[in-house]
Image (cartoon, rainbow, N blue to C red):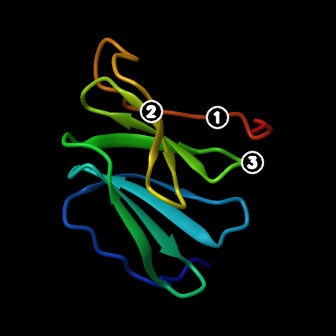
Amino acid sequence: ELRLQAEFKCREAVTDCCLTRDGRTLVCTSQDGVVGVYCMDLLRQVRKFQVGSLPLSCLALHPAAPTALVGSFDNALLAVSVDSGRVVQELPMAHDDAVTCLALPPHTTA
């Protein structure tokens, strides 16, 4: 049985969400270029980072590091630190069109 435990609000539409392997942190991307980090233990937002001027379309969490791989509507891929919000690496023209889906294998190493 699924029950609503918490409701988190974003300014613009949410485009993707990932839950960390331990289930304690939820990371979301949205159409306003923001990555939001939510603590499931506290049931509240703990960090919010503006990482782009265009909508973010998707994300995948690195299983062994506090890093999110984020796709953007400007064809870019961004590696973003979930702890600091700093863009660790950027591939500006990673794709011919907007990046709409990302996945990392579950046993990726740091």
Quadrant of the frame with the C terminus? top right
Residue at 19% in and 66% down: 11
Ranked by sequence position, the earlier of labels 1 and 3 is 3
Return the x and y of residue 43 as percentages of the image width and height: 49, 85
Q: Which mark is residue 39?
A: none
Q: How many marks?
A: 3
Q: Residues within 10 Å of mark 3 (few under 14, many from 20)?
A: few
Return the x and y of residue 1 as percentages of the image width and height: 62, 79
Q: Say above or below: 94 vs 64.
A: above
Q: Secondary structure at mark 1?
A: loop
Q: Amino acid at mark 1?
A: Leu
Q: Amino acid at mark 3?
A: Ala
Quadrant of res 39: bottom right
Ranked by sequence position, the earlier of labels 2 and 3 is 3
Q: Which mark is residue 101?
A: 2
Q: Secondary structure at mark 2?
A: loop
In the rendered image, which residue does mark 3 sit on? 64
Residue at 29% in and 74% down: 9
Q: Say above or below: 24 vs 3.
A: above
Q: Is residue 42 left or right of residue 55?
A: right
Q: Are marks 1 and 3 in contact (CB under 8 Å)?
A: no
Q: Marks 2 and 1, Cα distance to the nearest angstrom?
A: 11 Å
Q: Which mark is residue 104?
A: 1
Q: Residues within 10 Å of mark 1 (few under 14, many from 20)?
A: few
Q: Residues within 10 Å of mark 2 (few under 14, many from 20)?
A: few
Q: Marks 2 and 3, Cα distance to the nearest angstrom?
A: 20 Å
Q: Secondary structure at mark 3?
A: loop
Q: Say above or below: 88 vs 41.
A: above
Return the x and y of residue 81 as percentages of the image width and height: 53, 51
